[in-house]
Image (cartoon, helix red, strand yellow):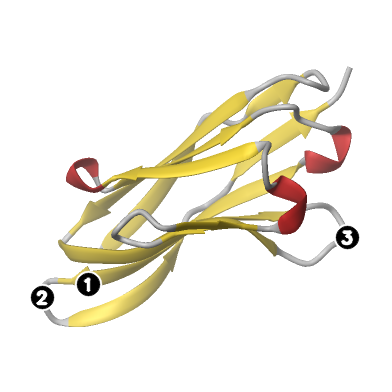
Amino acid sequence: QVQLVESGGGLVQPGGSLRLSCAASGSISGINAMGWYRQAPGKQRELVAGISNSGIANYAESMKGRFTISRDNGKNTVYLQMSSLKPEDTAVYFCNADILVARSSWFNVWGQGTQVTVST
């Protein structure tokens, strides 16, 4: 069994910054792509950013220049550095990863989510 655990969410003022972390644990034999998604109330879940196991990153258009995704393969952890935050960035942020479990099968795993609220 594997799990992803996010941390770092919270309340921040407009223009502020936050850094989210997501650590994978369990019977992990390898991790391929990792990414961050978000879901605002009443809206569909959307991709924020993704990163390959070699470090190639891609971003949703509205996040380019404000958000930076990175990963530490030795720690099985992915990060999302968010800056110049706007009220419309308020959402639950979810971590996602493709994980090879026990050298056997690949699973697409989701974290439980962490709330980010941008407000005065």
Which residue is drawn at the image coordinates 72% and 23% (left, top)?
11
Mark 2 near mark 3, Cβ–Cβ under 8 Å? Answer: no
In the rendered view of the protein, which quadrant contains the N terminus? bottom left
- Say the numbered circle drawn on residue 42: 3
Mark 2 near mark 1, Cβ–Cβ under 8 Å? Answer: yes
Q: How packed is label 1: few (under 14 Cα within 10 Å), some, or many (20 or more)?
A: some
Helix, strand, or loop for circle 3? loop
Which amino acid, by three-letter code, is at mark 1? Leu
Identify which residue, 99 or 15, lies in the foreground. 15
Identify which residue, 17 or 106, lies in the foreground. 17
Quarter occupied by residue 51: bottom left
- 28 to 41, vertically: above or below: below
Helix, strand, or loop for circle 2? loop
Which residue is drawn at the image coordinates 88% and 60% (left, top)?
42
- 96 to 76, vertically: above or below: below
Which residue is drawn at the image coordinates 71% and 64% (left, top)?
45
Classify residue 72 as left or right of residue 39.
Answer: left
Which residue is drawn at the image coordinates 62% and 47% (left, top)?
93
Q: Position of residue 120 (x, y in %)?
A: 89, 17
Quarter occupied by residue 2: bottom left
Residues at marks 2 and 3, CA–CA distance in whole angstroms: 39 Å
Classify residue 6 as left or right of residue 65.
Answer: left
Residue of label 2: 103
Which amino acid, by three-letter code, is at mark 2? Arg
Q: Position of residue 22 (x, y in %)?
A: 41, 43
Residue of label 1: 100
